[in-house]
Image: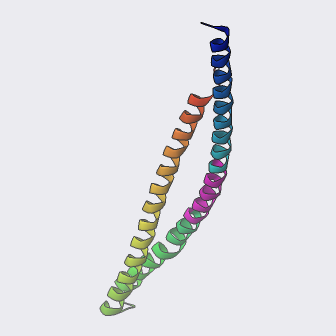
Amino acid sequence: MSQLAVEKVIVELNSFRKQIAMIREEITKTTSSLNDRASILNDAINKSLNQLGKQLGEGQLSELLSLQSRYQSGQISDQDYQARRDYYGTEIRSMIQTLDETKKVMMIMAQLDQRTASTASDLSPQA
C-alpha cells in the first residue's frame, strides 16, 4: 500500500473518530435533557398521586362509609342514598382510572430509563 493511501485511510479514521465523538456528545446532551424532563414529570406525577391518595383516603371513601352508616341507621332515604352512592362510586372509579393511567406513565418512564442506561453504556468509549 502506498504512503498516500495510508495517509488517506488515517485521515478518514480521524474524521470518523471526530464524528463519533460529536455523536456521543449529542447523545450525552440529549440524555441529560431527557433525564431533566423525566425528573420534572416524575415530580408532577408524585404530587398528583399524593393528592389522589389524600382525596381517596380522606375524602371520597370516608364520605362513602359515612353515607353507608347514615343509610343503615335510617337517617337518609333510599333514593337519596342511591344517588349519593352512585356519585361517590363514579368519583372513586375516576380516581382509580387516573391512578391506573399514572401507573402506565410510570412504567413507560421506567422502560425509558432502562433504555437510556443501556444505550449510554453501549456508547461509552472503549479503553
Residue farthest along the top direction in this orientation:
1
Q: Quadrant of residue 28?
A: top right
* Residue occupying the point 58% across, 63% down: 50
Residue sitting nearer the eye, 100 or 10: 10
Residue 87 locus on image (x, y percent):
39, 83
Quadrant containing the N terminus is top right
Q: Is residue 22 above or below residue 13?
A: below
Residue 83 lies left or right of residue 116; in this view the side is left
Q: Is residue 1 above or below residue 91?
A: above
* Residue occupying the point 56% across, 29% down: 122
Q: Which residues are magenta?
A: 35-49
Residue sitting nearer the eye, 16 or 29: 16
Residue 114 lies left or right of residue 88; in this view the side is right
Q: Quadrant of residue 64?
A: bottom left
* Residue occupying the point 54% across, 34% down: 118
How many labels sit on residues? 0
Q: Is residue 93 above or below residue 8?
A: below
Residue 70 locus on image (x, y percent):
41, 85
Residue 127 lies left or right of residue 119; in this view the side is right
Residue 127 visible in image:
no
